[in-house]
Amino acid sequence: ATRLASRRAKKGAGSPDFEMWPKLANNKHEVGSIGICKVLLMNDTNYPCWIVLVPAKNNLVEVADLPEKEQEIVWKEVQFCATTLQKLFPCDKMNIASIGNICPQLHIHVTCRKDGDVAWPGPCYGAAPPKPYTDDELEAMLKKLRTALGCQ
């Protein structure tokens, strides 16, 4: 059975009382934590890999809401994830975005894009219905990401 982030990602390493908005956790699987951020896998195989980093701190909307030192840590975690994903899933373009118009809790998308994917060259956000992982695909992807990212 799969474990959606909405079932597991309620508490985080960043703050002991961290609570993820259910709307943000919806249709994602928890990979684990790296430093300040929780890492979630979008349940969408339309793209080689699409993760979302969520700083495990409450009441954040913008990166600027974090203290300066924590902003640096978050951006280093984003860069680490992007570099790691590029090695695991060579792609034509790495999309990194913090939009938050639908869910204002601070989160950062890191998406491997390929020329010719269902949304290319436009943005992937809402471009096509998600194509969920099978149980076997999900298990393999989570193992691959957890190993490569060193998630706890």
Image (cartoon, helix red, strand yellow):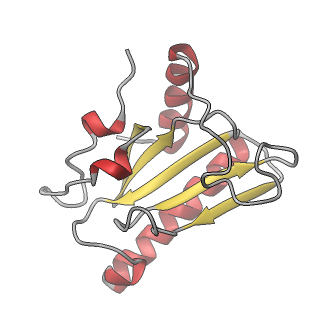
Please name whichever residue, 56 or 88, is drawn nearer the observer in this view of the structure. Answer: 56
Residue at (58, 66) in percent of width and height:
97
Q: Position of residue 131 (x, y in %)?
A: 62, 31
Q: Quadrant of residue 56?
A: bottom left
Q: Is residue 144 above or below residue 81?
A: above
Please name whichever residue, 90 or 133, is drawn nearer the observer in this view of the structure. Answer: 133
The answer to whether residue 37 is left or right of residue 112 is: left
Residue reaching furthest left? 17
Residue reaching furthest right? 116
Residue at (39, 84) in percent of width and height:
64
Q: Is residue 11 above or below residue 54?
A: above
Residue at (51, 44) in percent of width and height:
149
Q: Quadrant of the C terminus?
A: top left
Q: Quadrant of the N terminus?
A: top left
Q: Position of residue 32 (x, y in %)?
A: 37, 41
The answer to whether residue 42 is left or right of residue 103 is: right
Please name whichever residue, 37 or 27, is drawn nearer the observer in this view of the structure. Answer: 27
The answer to whether residue 5 is left or right of residue 83 is: left
Residue at (13, 56) in percent of width and height:
16
Q: Position of residue 144 (x, y in %)?
A: 56, 30
Q: Is residue 36 above or below residue 63?
A: above
Q: Position of residue 67 (x, y in %)?
A: 31, 83
